[in-house]
Image (cartoon, helix red, strand yellow):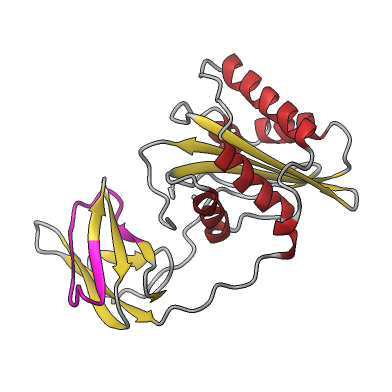
């Protein structure tokens, strides 16, 4: 979300369960370039924004440079490369490896704009459905323990981020918004997340966990041994239940931070 957000989607019997984070934006790569370079936030950034760079093929060890570091600077964070928009203009970002292969993309930086108004449902209380949320955490930790991995303590920032996303009543994953919600709530690292939506409000926590258990990718997110904390969000509106699970992955990168 990473961001480290991954795992494939699977249909749920009682509703919609979306995939974890997918790559939201790419840049066009010339046919003769053997290394592909793109940006998580697309080819246009605002002054002050940071965007993770996607360099392929996966596992390629590259050096990344900017043609105008005063406009777009690049820096390596762990094994990832990040572009930082410094001032208005355009810069070519080039990745090259030891074999002399390279690829590039152009990033354009525009002026900072005022943030968009908050989504209406963001104003819903972050303490809504707390009893269901606590039961959801209990059931998730019960599932983790039964599968030989440690139970997770609650993280307030991830609790708030998950509730903000469930309050928006998403029926599929919105990668940038989820990642930004985590950052804005105060969680600085990458994370995994699950979403399930179903008709009805009874036994919501159990139904959410059952849905995730029955979807291999979402089950793996739930029992990921790398995770060290958890937050969940539950919103019930007009007879529909929306459930989010955010699990923190320390020492990983949220590219929207």
Q: Is residue 73 magenta?
A: yes
- Is-magenta flag for residue 78? no
Q: Is residue 58 above or below residue 129?
A: below
In-image side of 192 versus 121 (left or right): left
Q: Is residue 169 in view? A: no
Q: Front-most of 54 and 188? A: 188
Q: Position of residue 62 (x, y in %)?
A: 18, 56
Q: Quadrant of residue 26?
A: bottom left
Q: Percent position (x, y) of residue 8?
A: 55, 46
Q: Which residues are magenta?
A: 52-74
Q: How many marks?
A: 0
Q: Quadrant of the C terminus?
A: bottom left
| Relative to 56, residue 130 above or below | above
In percent of width and height, residue 176 lies at 53, 60
Q: Is residue 146 left or right of residue 30?
A: right
Answer with the quarter of the image where residue 194 lies: top right
Q: In the image, what residue occupies the spot 52% across and 52% down?
A: 21
Residue found 30% across the figure and 59% down from its top: 82
Where 38 sits versus 193, above or below? below
- Residue 220 position, x and y percent, is 54, 32
């Amino acid at each position: 979300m990473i961001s480290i957000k991954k795992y494939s989607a699977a249909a749920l019997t009682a509703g919609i369960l979306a995939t974890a984070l997918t790559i939201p934006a790419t840049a066009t790569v010339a046919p003769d370039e053997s290394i592909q370079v793109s940006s998580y936030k697309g080819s246009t950034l605002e002054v002050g924004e940071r965007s993770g760079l996607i360099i392929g093929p996966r596992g390629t060890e590259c050096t990344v440079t900017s043609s105008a570091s005063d406009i777009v600077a690049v820096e390596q964070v762990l094994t990832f490369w990040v572009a930082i928009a410094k001032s208005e203009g355009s810069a070519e970002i080039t990745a090259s490896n030891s074999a002399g292969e390279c690829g590039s993309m152009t990033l354009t930086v525009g002026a900072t704009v005022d943030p968009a108004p908050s989504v209406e449902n963001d104003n819903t209380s972050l303490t809504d459905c707390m009893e269901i949320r606590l039961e959801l955490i209990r059931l998730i930790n019960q599932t983790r323990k039964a599968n030989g991995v440690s139970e997770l303590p609650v993280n307030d920032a991830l609790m708030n981020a998950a509730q903000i996303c469930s309050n928006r009543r998403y029926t599929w994953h919105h990668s940038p918004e989820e990642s930004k919600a985590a950052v804005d709530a105060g969680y600085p690292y990458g994370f995994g997340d699950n979403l399930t939506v179903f008709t009805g409000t009874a036994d919501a926590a159990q139904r959410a966990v059952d849905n995730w258990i029955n979807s291999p990718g979402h089950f793996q997110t739930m029992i990921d041994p790398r995770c060290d904390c958890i937050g969940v969000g539950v919103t019930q509106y007009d007879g529909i239940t929306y459930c989010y699970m955010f699990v923190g992955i320390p020492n990983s990168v949220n590219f929207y931070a």
